[in-house]
Amino acid sequence: MISLQEGIIPEIRQKNDFAVVAITKHGVEIARKLNEQMSGTDVYYMSKFVKGDEEQRSIQLFEGSVRMLFPALFPAYQGLIIIISLGAVVRMIAPLLKDKKQDPGVVVIDDNGDNVISVLSGHLGGANELTHEVAAAIGARAIITTASDVQKTIPVDLFGRRFGWVWDSADKLTPVSAAVVNEEKIAVIQESGEPNWWTHERPIPPNIVRFATIAEGRASEPNAVLLITHRMLKPEEQSILSNGVLYRPKVIVLGIGCNRGTASEEIEQVIAETLEELSFSIRSVKAVCTIDLKKDEEGLLEVTRKHGWEFNYFTPEQLNTVHVEAPSETVFKFTGAYAVSEPAVKLYIGQDKLTLIKKKSGNVTISVGLLEFETSAEPGQGDK
């Protein structure tokens, strides 16, 4: 727990780019929701609102005046998302302000979660883009007061963040961002992931065109590329990223069955080998699913904690409602379910089609499925 004392800058555990701060009961609920809906956030709230799962979720508790927390947060984070009244925030951060090239972006959310307001460093600090991403994540209204900021384009460094998308490398973020801002020809090539990434009411700018495949995007001869895929690229596809950013959407779901006491190292090795065989990126894994008998399996818990993956489990009765390719009487004898990994994935993704039905390796059984999304784009919204 962080104990805030006058004149002493507290020690914090900074893991991500953005800090979320709350001091009220409703604010804490918004902060926790945002932490679930938008990756890349570290959450801080008052210890009196402890829920019991803070350590598991890497949420940091504090006691004392929140004003004394900001001297530590200001230099550490790219952006601050503060669920406190606007006037109070202005008074607390005023002594810390330097200039727009150094100050983090600051965004304020009202205690009801209705409005998200860009407060500080709207352009250079990215607060305006962050405001739109946060508003989209919690279903609020984005309020931008910068007169010259019309938000016509994509924030390359925040693209898909509310869905949990991560980029493979930051090498091309700057030149690609420049191409987007300068309204050059941009190809958004999306093979997987959530399609509703455009958060504005206005149409997608005409210089940004969406494609379903790398071949189609390459044929358009773009100046820059945003590529969204869970696949590992083939050697002949690599050149598409000569001026491009590769995003990894969270679409891979793993079903895992294992013997009691299986080491996390063995489970992780099977996962890594399987994904390599499928040419899938481990950065696109969203969740691990299993039977409720394994909800306390330490090896599984260690792996999911290490990677920050969701951990889901189902009862034998739930698993037995799903058709499986090769039901096992032996598995049923020990677990009450005719299979574990295969039906667990099918239940999570909501369909019967799997990329890998089942593979047994040592003490581990693994199945792999992909989350699919319906296209929500309308004609004339930059699709090809």
Image: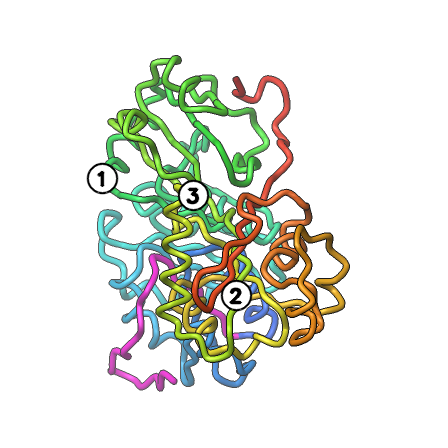
Seen in the picture, residue 284 relative to 306 is either above or below; the reply is above
Give the x, y percent position of residue 69.
34, 74
Q: Is residue 197 left or right of residue 236?
A: right
Is residue 269 inside the magenta stretch? no
Give the x, y percent position of residue 351.
68, 46
| Residue 59 in sight in this render | no
For the stretch drawn in magenta, the main secondary structure is loop
Camera-nearest residue between 62 and 208: 208
Camera-nearest residue between 108 and 52: 52
Q: Which mark is in front, 1 or 2?
A: 1
In the rendered image, the quadrant that contains the N terminus is bottom left
Mark 1: which secondary structure? loop
Amino acid type indicated by mark 2: Ala
Mark 3: which secondary structure? helix
Range of the magenta residues? 1-23
For disc 2, the marked residue is: 31
Q: CA distance from mark 2 to mark 3?
A: 36 Å
Q: At 69% across and 67% down in the image, what residue appears?
A: 329
Amino acid type indicated by mark 3: Leu
Sequence-wise first label, 2 or 3: 2
For disc 1, the marked residue is: 171
Q: Which mark is residue 278?
A: 3
10 Å crowding of disc 3: few (<14), some (14-19), many (20+): some
Is residue 17 inside the magenta stretch? yes
Give the x, y percent position of residue 142.
54, 45
Seen in the picture, residue 352 relative to 310 is either above or below; the reply is above
Q: At 39% across and 45% down in the image, what residue appears?
A: 277
Mark 2: which secondary structure? helix
Amino acid type indicated by mark 1: Asp
Q: CA distance from mark 1 to mark 2?
A: 31 Å
